[in-house]
């Protein structure tokens, strides 16, 4: 090989040229007035220069690689649309996972862009400030590319037409929305602990990696490609999450208990939100890659185990309730699917009872729980539907004051009893779904009493009217198309016509 | 308790020489294939060396080209012009 041209500066030096010396001590304004948010959380920072940049992507390299990613992605999006890629997916039921993704997850990318733009202004240390600003750019790219990729499905399938409006209003979408609202209204260090560490480092693998692999398995070229394209930025975001934790822990011992409490809180909030993903993986992918349980074992028990072992030297323990969350991995996808099966007349995607082969797969993957607790119930619902009595639940559920999930999850040691906790604050009672959520409420009740709970709002008359139909119209749902069971839906009709046409040719 | 570091890459033309280099430079690494991607696990430490990837590719290769096919990682990152390393403090 020809002699290599040597770069004048090493990578560390090049990166420090980008990120250091850009800031200054203010003279005619107090530093605390210029950066009012970075010390009120109780985090002590003595030396901002102690910040280590793990990925050292300079601006020129950033634009070069990002533009290359974009070119690749848009080539795929174009060819997907030109070649009617939607015809190549395994089954139209799969598209319901995309609907949930577009309405539930993609708007979080935008929320992340907002959050990182905000905290990218608020740190007085220039290292984290640059890292956050660059991440904000990535997150904006993620929401844009996701909307572009999935818009092709909107031409043919129902439920994809009003994602931002639905995200802000629809009952189940308040679960992911409130997660990010909670994070963005916290201080900058808590924001990074919640999003960069708990969500992106510890949990995002569970969201993106098996799900994108599932998209690949189900012939959804568009989703795999945007997913992997976003995920390639995620590797950088994950290291920011780990770095901010180590930075806080190394700076001052007094930071340790604060960081521990944030980890406990955001781990629990994250696992709650991921119950949506659990049911996507176990129920919504016609061809399945791995069960939620298996994904949990690989990405939380194994990868998280190694991570928390590494943090032990700072006095950090694995998140409180990690053991409960691990027990939940046996149950949560089934319970979440059941909640949506009950309320699919009020949702912008379809549900269904899995077919025999799919039930067998679940029995095999969940030998200790599925046949005992969940299969009989699904078979009963199937029988009812076939007898013309498809069950829809017409009573609105109570929501957890913290995670906002309908209180349908059970005690994990007693899977036939609903878990139900109560707190009192200023003479009012507040309900939470678990000890994890109750702890969060009890620590900051003045924050969580302000939660915009969709069911409360409906009953207070703030959501379009007093009848279910008024509310659903206010959600901008096309009734009879976006909602109800997959069986009998326009999506199904269209898909079956395409398939019939295919066998003819 | 196992202290596995891990790198997940897309399976495509860009990543094939990287996967080969990783397997060569980290004899204990175990590659698990899933649809569209490969997860490579290694106990304690895993390194991607520029030199090895360049040998396989037959051209200059910037370590940051990893950015194009990386899907996920686990471990502390150390990145330099000549290598990309993941490790846990043992
Ligand atoms: Fe993102
Ligand atoms: Fe991210
Ligand atoms: Zn809850």
Image (cartoon, coloured by chain):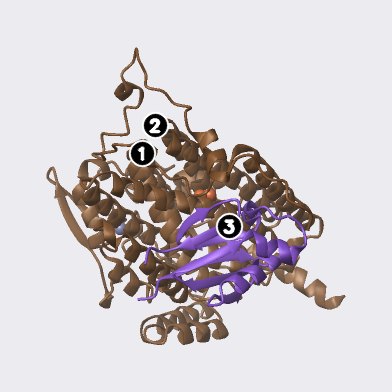
Whether residue A479 can be seen here = no
Q: Which residue is mark 3?
A: B83
Q: Is residue A340 left or right of residue A407?
A: right
- In the picture, residue A80 is in which quadrant? bottom right
Along the line of sight, which residue is nearer the eye, A292 or A498? A292
Labelled pair 2, 3 in contact (Cβ < 8 Å):
no
Residue occupying the far left of the picture? A427
Q: Which residue is mark 2?
A: A122
Q: Chain of mark 2?
A: A
Badge 3 crowding class, 10 Å Cα cut-off, few under 14, some 14 to 19, many 20 or more, is some
The x and y percentages for residue A9 are: 60, 40
In the rendered image, what is the letter of the chain coloured purple?
B
Dot in front, 3 or 1: 3
Residue occupying the far top of the picture? A28
Q: Is residue B62 above or below residue B89?
A: above
Whether residue B11 can be seen here = yes
Q: Is residue A32 above or below residue B16?
A: above
Q: Residue at x 43, y 30 (%)?
A: A121
The x and y percentages for residue A367 are: 41, 87
Question: Is the residue at mark 2 in contact range of ligand 2, meaning its CB lies under 8 Å from it?
Answer: no
Q: Which residue is mark 1?
A: A188
């Amino acid at each position: 090989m020809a002699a290599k041209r040597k770069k004048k500066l090493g990578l560390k030096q090049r990166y420090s040229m980008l990120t250091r010396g850009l800031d200054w001590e203010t003279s005619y304004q107090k530093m605390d007035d210029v950066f009012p948010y970075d010390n009120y959380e109780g985090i002590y920072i003595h030396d901002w220069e102690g910040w280590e940049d793990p990925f050292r992507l300079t601006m020129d390299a950033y634009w070069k690689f990002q533009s290359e990613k974009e070119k690749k992605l848009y080539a795929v999006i174009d060819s997907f649309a030109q070649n009617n890629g939607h015809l190549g997916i395994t089954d139209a039921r799969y598209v319901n996972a995309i609907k949930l993704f577009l309405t539930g997850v993609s708007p979080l990318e935008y929320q992340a862009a907002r959050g990182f733009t905000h905290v990218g202004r608020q740190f007085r240390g220039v290292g984290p400030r640059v890292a956050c600003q660059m991440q904000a750019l990535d997150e904006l790219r993620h929401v844009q590319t996701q909307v572009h990729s999935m818009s092709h499905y909107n031409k043919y399938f129902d439920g994809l037409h009003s994602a931002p409006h639905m995200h802000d209003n629809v009952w189940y979408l308040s679960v992911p929305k409130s997660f990010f609202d909670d994070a963005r209204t916290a201080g900058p260090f808590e924001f990074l602990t919640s999003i960069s560490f708990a969500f992106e480092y510890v949990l995002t693998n569970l969201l993106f990696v098996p799900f994108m692999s599932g998209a690949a398995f189900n012939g959804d070229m568009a989703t795999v490609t945007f997913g992997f394209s976003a995920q390639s930025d995620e590797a950088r975001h994950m290291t920011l999450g780990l770095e901010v934790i180590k930075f806080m822990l190394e700076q001052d011992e007094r930071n340790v208990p604060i960081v521990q409490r944030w980890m406990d809180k955001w781990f629990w909030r994250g696992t709650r939100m991921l119950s949506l993903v659990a049911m996507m993986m176990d129920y919504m992918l016609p061809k399945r890659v791995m069960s939620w349980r298996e994904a949990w074992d690989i990405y939380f028990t194994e990868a998280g185990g190694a991570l928390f072992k590494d943090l032990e030297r700072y006095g950090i323990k694995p998140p409180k309730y990690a053991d409960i969350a691990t027990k939940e991995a046996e149950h949560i996808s089934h319970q979440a699917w059941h909640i949506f099966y009950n309320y699919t007349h009020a949702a912008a995607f379809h549900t269904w009872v899995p077919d025999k082969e799919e039930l067998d797969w679940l029995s095999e993957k969940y030998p200790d729980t599925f046949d005992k607790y969940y299969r009989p119930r699904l078979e009963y619902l199937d029988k009812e539907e076939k007898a013309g009595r498809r069950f829809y639940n017409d009573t609105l559920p109570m929501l957890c004051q913290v995670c906002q999930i309908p209180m349908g999850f059970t005690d994990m040691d007693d899977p036939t009893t609903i878990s139900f906790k109560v707190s009192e604050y200023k003479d009012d009672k507040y309900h939470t779904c678990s000890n994890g959520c109750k702890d969060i409420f009890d620590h900051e009740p003045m924050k969580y009493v302000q939660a915009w709970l969709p069911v409360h709002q409906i009953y207070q008359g703030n959501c379009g009217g007093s009848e279910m139909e008024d509310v659903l119209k206010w959600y901008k749902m096309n009734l009879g198309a976006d909602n109800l069971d997959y069986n009998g839906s326009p999506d199904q009709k269209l898909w079956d016509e395409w398939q019939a046409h295919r066998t003819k040719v | 308790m196992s202290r596995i570091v891990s790198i997940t890459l897309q399976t495509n033309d860009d990543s094939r020489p990287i996967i080969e280099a990783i397997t060569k430079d980290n004899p204990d690494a175990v590659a698990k294939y899933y649809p569209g991607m490969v997860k490579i696990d290694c106990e304690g430490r895993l390194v991607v060396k520029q030199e090895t990837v360049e040998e396989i590719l037959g051209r200059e290769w910037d370590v940051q080209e990893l950015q194009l096919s990386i899907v996920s990682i686990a471990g502390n990152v150390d990145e330099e012009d000549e290598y990309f390393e993941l490790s846990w403090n043992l």
